[in-house]
Image (cartoon, rainbow, N blue to C red):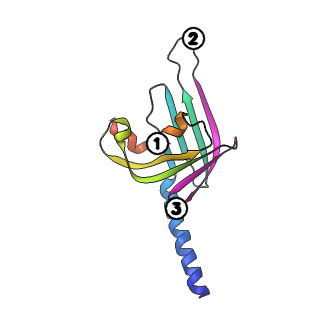
Amino acid sequence: MLKKFISGFFLISTCLSLFAGELEGNYSAVTESEEEILINLKPNNTGEFIVGVYAIEDDEKDWRKTENIEWSIFDKKLFIEFESNKHMKYQVVECHSYNEFGKKGCSFGLKPIGGSFIKNDSIMRNSLWKTKELKKLWK
């Protein structure tokens, strides 16, 4: 019985590790031209969350904020903890549709499903896709 439990545990651990390996990398949201939302998921369950706004008026200033994060995965849900004690939760979608921004097709993506940000904040509204896949759309 113990042997069966241990082998099952290693099988589950291996599957989660493989899935986590698929998650690692850079993600981008497709937003209005003056906004940017990026996530960099690193192999050691850390990373960076980057939000930027680019000035469209001469009297405004660009700003960009980078925050360190820790992430974990459970049941195809990505949990992100920010160093500012906020959090986000995303559904991991293997073929996340590009319909959100008017394109055909899909690729590996993250759909926001909860968090501690203001409900209408763009972080809570915008899905993210693997950056390398999005770049293929605009070549």
Alpha carbon of mark 1 to alpha carbon of mark 3: how far?
18 Å
- The earlier-in-sequence mark between 1 and 3 is 3
**Could you say whether the residue bearing mark 1 is in a helix, strand or loop?**
loop
- The amino acid marked with disc number 2 is Asp
Residue 64, image x, y percentages: 59, 29
Amino acid beneath label 3: Asp
Q: Tell me the element at label 3.
A: loop
Up the image or down, 76 lies above or below 88; here it is below
At 57% from the left and 22% from the top, the residue drawn is 62
* Residue at image mark 3: 75
Of labels 3 and 2, the one closer to you: 3
Gap between marks 2 and 1, in whole Å? 30 Å
Q: Which mark is residue 59?
A: 2
Left or right side of 63 for 30: left
Q: Evaluate if marks 2 and 1 touch, with contact meaning CB atoms under 8 Å apart.
A: no
- In primary-sequence order, the first of circles 3 and 2 is 2
Give the residue drawn at x 57%, y 11%.
Answer: 59
In the image, farthest residue toward the left: 104
**Cβ–Cβ below 8 Å for labels 1 and 3?**
no
**Quarter of the image containing the C terminus?**
top left
Q: Quadrant of residue 131?
A: top left
Mark 1 neighbour density, 10 Å: few (under 14) some (14–19) many (20 or more): many
- Which residue lies under the disc numbered 1? 127
Place of residue 14 in the rendered image (x, y in percent of width and height, measured from the top left):
53, 69
Upstream in sequence: badge 2 or badge 1: 2
- CA–CA distance between discs 3 and 2? 46 Å
- Nearer to us of marks 2 and 1 is 1
The boundaries of the magenta stretch are 63-87
Mark 2 element type: loop
Q: Position of residue 42 (x, y in %)?
A: 57, 50
